[in-house]
Image (tube, grey):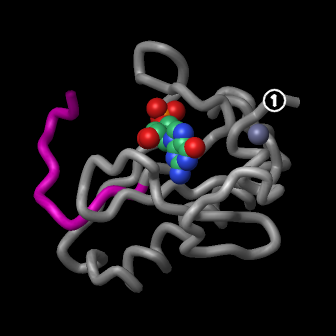
Amino acid sequence: MDCLFCKIIKKEIPAKTVYEDDNVLAFEDINPQAPVHILVIPKKHISTSLDIKDEDNELIGQMVQAANVIAKERGIAERGFRTVMNCNKEAGQTVFHIHLHLFGGRAMNWPPG
Ligand code: 5GP
Ligand code: ZN
């Protein structure tokens, strides 16, 4: 399967890893949109959030927990941060291996663009 993030998991493409456990990997976004911009991904390939199965529910929780750990490490937990999972074209999904964007370090606008 020709998936960019699967290649990052297999270390075939380098990334600045900030967190890793048996099920989840997190690394710096290559084109950061905030002072902190990290992608949290499952090691299991899931193309979009629409493809999340009941059996994946624990894994999705682990992604959110990993984002929390990183936010605390980066000192943005109390200030506030944003997690986003884009799904399909109109949301701007460009990599079809689900990922939680973790943004922080600046005030976030609402509504999102
Ligand atoms: P999406 O638009 O699918 O929600 O987010 C994809 C994200 O992946 C973008 O923020 C983009 O900058 C990031 N990205 C794309 N290619 C690479 C890469 O090769 N390495 C890293 N670290 N991030 C990437
Ligand atoms: Zn993948």
Q: Nearer the viewer, residue 9 or 14?
A: 14
Percent position of residue 29, x then y? 45, 52
Q: Nearer the viewer, residue 113 or 32?
A: 32
Identify the residue shown where x is 82% and y is 49%: 44
Decide whether residue 108 is among the magenta residues.
yes
Q: How many marks?
A: 1
Going by the image, does 104 lie left or right of 57? left
* Residue picked out by circle 1: 2
Going by the image, does 30 lie left or right of 80? right
Identify the residue shown where x is 21% and y is 33%: 112
Q: Is residue 14 above or below residue 111?
A: below
Query: Which range is magenta?
Result: 102-113
What amino acid does circle 1 point to?
A: Asp
Q: Nearer the viewer, residue 24 or 51?
A: 24
User: Is the magenta region chiefly helix, strand or loop?
Assistant: loop
Q: Is residue 61 above or below residue 71?
A: above
Percent position of residue 102, x then y? 40, 57
Taking the image as drawn, is residue 65 in sight? no
Percent position of residue 103, x then y? 32, 56
